[in-house]
Image (cartoon, rainbow, N blue to C red):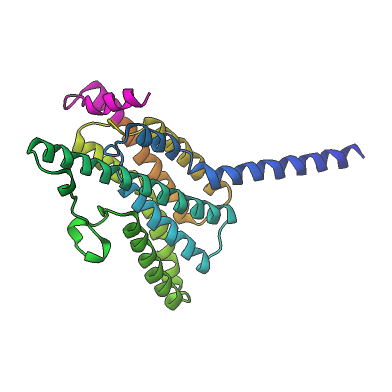
């Protein structure tokens, strides 16, 4: 009798741990972007955050959803992709509005300096349907990003439908999905390198990336996820720690004077 009660208790605990782990997988990837989102809203400055991070995650998660049609994987990973896509679109919407507002304010200040009329202030619009590669992922409206994402999804879904019976294609699709996600931190790494600073980037976000990716890689290994998942998970952890090294290096050995603009804006918001 006692042994039966113990087995039931262990079963309940096992189920509880599984649900908690699944919930962490679904929503854990979103948490790192909360401090970055709040920082951008507070400072009205999105220069320190690379929107190419959003591009990488959108592509990776769309491909991962399509991969599931060819090879089954854990349902929490599917929901993680859906939640992440929504989150990246929210981040893009904020960054676009902040960037366009900043460009408009810059133009307005220059027009005031030349005594021009305020109604003459216009920022040239960069649209997705212009198909100008020079302004790719630098468009003036959130709608253009949405159009690009929908176009990519439609093309990728059509190709997947045609080649779904090909084992090589399905495995390649899975590899591309997780490899693209493994490159998540690369745009931010490059952005920091170009700026020779990590100012404007949320350090909390990167710390959460590192801890979340470590947990996720362990989850892949425990649940025996496809080999592409955990190999690229390890690569992702490496990139996260490379960014954390940048935080240490640029704070200890500053490469350029610290901008006071962002700080003054933050102070006003506080």
Q: Residue furthest right?
A: 1
Determine the image quadrant of residue 259.
top left
- Counting from the top left corner in percent of width and height, residue 186 is at 30, 45
Closer to the camera in the image, 70 or 124: 124
Q: Is residue 26 magenta-colored?
A: no
Horizontal placement of 243 versus 90: left or right? left
Give the magenta-colored segment's residue range. 247-270
Horizontal placement of 65 versus 106: left or right? right
Closer to the camera in the image, 159 or 123: 123
Determine the image quadrant of residue 205.
top left
- Counting from the top left corner in percent of width and height, residue 114 is at 7, 38
Q: Is residue 177 above or below residue 101?
A: below
Residue at 46% in and 41% down: 213
How many dots with numbers? 0
Residue at 35% in and 58% down: 143
- Counting from the top left corner in percent of width and height, residue 68 is at 52, 64
Q: Is residue 30 above or below residue 140?
A: above
Quarter placement of the N terminus: top right
Horizontal placement of 51 versus 222: left or right? left
Residue at 41% in and 52% down: 89
Residue at 30% in and 26% down: 248
Quarter placement of the C terminus: top left
Horizontal placement of 227 versus 194: left or right? right
Q: Residue furthest left?
A: 114
Q: Is residue 269 magenta-colored?
A: yes
For the stretch drawn in magenta, the main secondary structure is helix
């Amino acid at each position: 009798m006692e042994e039966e009660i113990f087995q039931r208790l262990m079963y309940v605990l096992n189920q509880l741990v599984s649900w908690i782990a699944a919930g962490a997988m679904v929503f854990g990837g979103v948490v790192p972007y909360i401090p970055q989102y709040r920082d951008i809203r507070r400072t009205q400055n999105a220069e320190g955050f690379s929107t190419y991070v959003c591009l990488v995650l959108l592509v990776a998660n769309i491909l991962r959803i399509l991969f599931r049609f060819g090879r089954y994987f854990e349902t929490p990973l599917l929901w993680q992709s859906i939640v992440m896509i929504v989150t990246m679109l929210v981040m893009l919407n904020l960054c676009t509005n902040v960037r366009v507002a900043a460009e408009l304010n810059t133009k307005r200040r220059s027009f005031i300096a030349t005594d021009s009329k305020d109604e003459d202030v216009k920022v040239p619009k960069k649209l997705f349907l212009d198909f100008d590669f020079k302004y790719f992922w630098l468009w003036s409206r959130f709608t253009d990003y949405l159009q690009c994402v929908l176009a990519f999804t439609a093309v990728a879904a059509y190709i997947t439908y045609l080649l779904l019976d090909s084992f090589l294609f399905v495995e390649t699709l899975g590899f591309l999905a997780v490899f693209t996600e493994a490159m998540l931190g690369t745009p931010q790494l490059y952005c920091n390198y170009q700026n020779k600073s990590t100012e404007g980037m949320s350090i909390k976000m990167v710390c959460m990336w590192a801890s979340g990716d470590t947990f996720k890689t362990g989850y892949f290994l425990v649940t025996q996820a496809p080999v592409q998942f955990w190999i690229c998970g390890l690569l992702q952890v490496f990139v996260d720690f490379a960014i954390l090294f940048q935080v240490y290096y640029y704070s200890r050995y500053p490469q350029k004077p610290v901008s006071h603009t962002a700080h003054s804006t933050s102070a006003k918001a506080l």
